[in-house]
Amino acid sequence: MAGKSGGLRLFFAATSAVAARPKLWVVALSTFCRMAPSRWWGRAPFLPLPAEDFLHFRMVTMYGADGSMEKDRQAKDIVAWLEWCRTWRSVKS
């Protein structure tokens, strides 16, 4: 990941991918809120984005090497993961 701009690009790519899938909105919002750092409103870019270290760790564990991958591919993977989370919630209930 390339700093804050990389996190913002991923945020917007994932948001646009999830926006087209209303069934994922609830699970996406709850997951997003869990990953938001505390007092996020006090730091630029004033969005509840996960910490860069956390994002880098997740990208390295998913894609290997330095964690770099096209943002569109990452957004597709996020959608697939959210779909899995949604089905897992229904299995737990």
Image: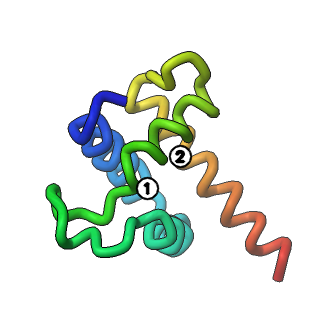
Picture residue at 53% right of the left edge, 67% below the top: 31
Picture residue at 77% right of the left edge, 74% below the top: 90
Residue 78 badge: 2
Q: Amino acid at mark 1?
A: Val
Picture residue at 37% right of the left edge, 30% below the top: 1
Picture residue at 33% right of the left edge, 42% below the top: 13
Q: Residue 6 placed where, x, y %?
A: 29, 35
- Nearer the observer, 3 or 19: 3
Of circles 2 and 1, the one toward us is 2
Q: Residues within 10 Å of mark 2 (few under 14, many from 20)?
A: some
* The C terminus sits in image quarter: bottom right
Q: Is residue 39 above or below residue 50?
A: below
Q: Residues within 10 Å of mark 1 (few under 14, many from 20)?
A: some
Alpha carbon separation for disc pair 2 and 1: 9 Å
Give the left or right position of residue 10, taking residue 92 as reference: left
Q: Secondary structure at mark 2?
A: helix
Disc 1 designates what residue?
18
Q: Residue 71 placed where, x, y %?
A: 38, 31
Task: Place residue 53 in its image quadrant.
Answer: top left
Q: Amino acid at mark 2?
A: Ile
